[in-house]
Amino acid sequence: MLTEYLNEALSRAKYEMIEDEEPFYGEIPELQGVWATGKSLEECRRNLMEVLEDWLFFSIAKGLPIPPIGGIELKPPEAIAC
């Protein structure tokens, strides 16, 4: 399920050229704050994947909502009582 979510999110990424040392800019519009840059389009894609993974782990760790993407919904695991 996680891999499907990542792939679906990345398939929705939008890329553009900007005037910067790293001229390739990419973002996932549905996920606020998920963006990256790179010196090439491929580097930008790799960086965007890392940002997306970090964003997901942070959101899960903090109990923040994770919006569904393309009908794929991630639900954090329930806390285990000891």
Image (tube, helix red, strand yellow):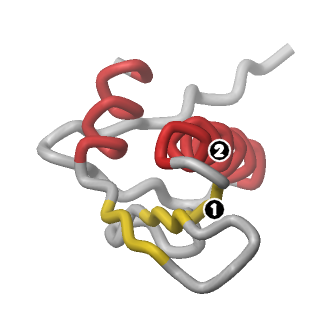
> Is 64 positioned to the left or the right of 54 in the image?
left
Q: Position of residue 32 (x, y in %)?
A: 50, 74
In the rendered image, the residue lying farthest to the bottom is 19
Which one is nearer the viewer's eye here, 12 or 21? 21
Hey, which quadrant is residue 56 in on the image?
A: top right
Three-letter amino acid code at the position of disc 1: Thr
- Tell me if mark 1 has few (under 14), some (14-19) or many (20+) residues whose alpha carbon lies within 10 angstroms of its own: many
Q: Helix, strand, or loop for circle 1?
A: strand
Residue at x 60% of width, y 85% of height: 19
Residue for badge 1 = 37
The quadrant the N terminus occupies is top left
The quadrant the C terminus occupies is top right
Which one is nearer the viewer's eye here, 79 or 39? 39
Residue at x 33% of width, y 45% of height: 9
- Tell me if mark 2 has few (under 14), some (14-19) or many (20+) residues whose alpha carbon lies within 10 angstroms of its own: some
Hey, which quadrant is residue 47 in on the image?
A: top right
Which one is nearer the viewer's eye here, 9 or 47? 47
Residue 10: mark in rendering: none
Q: Helix, strand, or loop for circle 2?
A: helix
Q: Position of residue 38 (x, y in %)?
A: 65, 55
Residue at x 43% of width, y 36% of height: 75
> Is 21 positioned to the left or the right of 8 in the image?
right
Residue for badge 2 = 47
> Is 76 positioned to the left or the right of 59 in the image?
left
Which one is nearer the viewer's eye here, 32 or 21? 21
Is the C-beta separation of discs 1 and 2 under 8 Å? yes
